[in-house]
Image (spheres, rainbow, N blue to C red):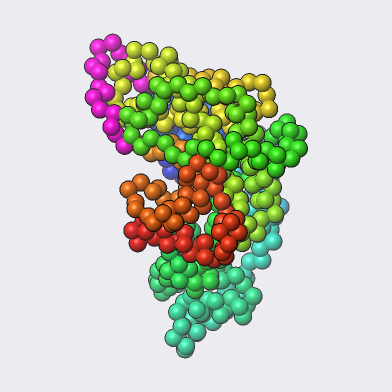
Amino acid sequence: MPRLSAVRVEALRELVDQLRFSSASAAAKHIDRAESLAAELDMEQTYPLEWVLFRLTDYRSTEIDGLVTGEALLRDLSAIVERLCAQARLTREDLPEHLTLAELTERWNVSTKSIERYRRRGLIARRATTGSASTPMLAFTRVAVERFEAEHAMALKSAKRFDRLTEAQSDSAVRRIERYQRSLGWSRAQAIDRTAHRMARAPETLRLLMKQRAPNNGGPDASDSQLIDAWWRGESAAAMGHLAGLAPSTAHGRLLNARADRLLGLRASLKPEQDRVRHLASLDELLSPDAVRTELSSGGPLSLAELLEAMHTRTVPVGAHERLLGQAIVGLRMRAHASLERLTPRAPALDAIETDLRWASRLKATLARPMLFVMGAQLREVLGPAADRLGSSEWQLLTGLSISSMSAALDRWDPWSQGRPAGAVSVAVGKTAARWLAAHPQSHRENTAVRLTTTDAAIDDWTRSLDPWQAWLEPPMLAGTQLQPEALALYQARFGLAGDRPHTVETLAIERGTTPRAIETNIRRVLRQLVGS
């Protein structure tokens, strides 16, 4: 009998607990709404719990407070649906057209463990009883399955091609690796590399196998995130190999695969809308104007005082300039999406996509900077007198939520339309402020004392959190670091930190009459200096 999947976020567990007294018909509606919600979530966004409750139940409440990340919500959403199904006592006959767990594993040619991983990425399972013994089963509606297939086609295609080790092959590989270590005195990484070559298997497959079979005998290990962090510290392939307990070449290959996996996770969010694709007659024309290549924003205020001042400073943007920026953003995203469709995990291909995404983020920051005044004006209008009674921590939270809303509004804005982005930003920020104010009634009580005694609180640079990929594609900041002029100019040109667009390693090598390896070596040296290693 399958156990109920755990809801990991405490606030979401409490939310499910509040719904336990719903009628069967109401629970069925909650389930349908949850399944629809999974298709709309952005893993990098943060959502108010009050909004989550509304999306699940169509009921608004000012008594529920708090925030949840899109990643955490998506991970728990299938478990929430499973519990709602159990509360509604659904039977298999109550389900719409669906596939069983066994049918889905056969359809995708994957293991049940893979299905569990997909559930944490938004594949919704329903729980129902079947047979006279009322035995619970998991089922996946055809709508949910086809939606997931459309959003994760590349990952499913790769999984279907994967030829898994049989139990006999696994045993043989483990014996061979241990024999090499014991007889030849090799490290585990050396033994795995040799065995992978002899068995025509990927070294990473055997590394994971040994991690499961003999987790205490392999020396240091590292997750993909740790390898990417080491890469940003400027560490060499040999150092990353030591960190991961791998040969340098294997560590480098694993790093490339980790970067590719993160990019592939963006495919759904980068897919262009059909009504915009029609306007993209020539991508070169969109990216050739100086307005989208120079004088770009590359940094924002690092204190609350500076951000609040920027929200009071009016800059009137030119409509034609806004449209150029917006159209170039769409073009870069479309080029990145097209490249992901034929992606191979090689450094030049990955660098080209990552550079396009950094460029799109610089353009978005440039488009968004004048919108800070619009955001500030809308916050002052919605908050009214309450604005003077907010403390620093409340302003930090509210401005963070408002910037997220502004970013989402700019994504929705059509730069080929006659409309201006300020209107979309104003509406989005107004809704965010109204929701926040309703959830914090104590913030606008008349007898509340003024608490904003200091605004010099440190904040994160808002220009580095406009797009989900910035979480791992933004380089270490330069603040307070002394670099040689040549090294500084190279670093700024590489990542677009001095007003110009970012550049790939190959482009910089051509411009400077050197090799990509030399450029990469110099960038690695700067990274090591920035992080103090």
Q: Give the range drawn in magenta.
A: 438-458
Q: Does the magenta stretch include residue 444?
A: yes
User: Against 311, is 465 above or below?
Assistant: below
From the viewer's side, name the closer residue of 87 and 372: 372
Q: In this orientation, which residue lies closer to the viewer: 133 or 191?
A: 191
User: Looking at the image, which is closer to me, 321 or 84?
Assistant: 321
The residue lying at 63 percent from left, 20 percent from top is: 419
- Report x, y in % for residue 144: 65, 40
Asked if 287 appears above or below 251 in the picture, the reply is above
Q: At 58% across and 62% down in the image, what residue appears?
A: 513
Q: In this view, does 499 lie above or below 382?
A: below
- From the viewer's perspective, is 126 left or right of 217? right
Examine the residues drawn in magenta and state their main secondary structure: loop
> Is there any visible trace of residue 8 in the rendered image?
yes
Look at the image and tell me in which quarter the C terminus lies.
bottom left
Residue 357 rendering spot, x and y as whole percentages: 57, 45
Q: Residue furthest bottom?
A: 183
Residue 477 image point, x, y percent: 40, 48
Front in this rendered view, residue 347 or 44: 347
- Where does residue 82 sit, x and y in percent of width and height? 54, 39
Residue 278 shown in magenta = no
Q: Report the residue at 76% width, 37% height from top.
A: 281
Quadrant of res 171: bottom right
Residue found at x 63% / y 32%: 324
Q: Quadrant of residue 532?
A: bottom left
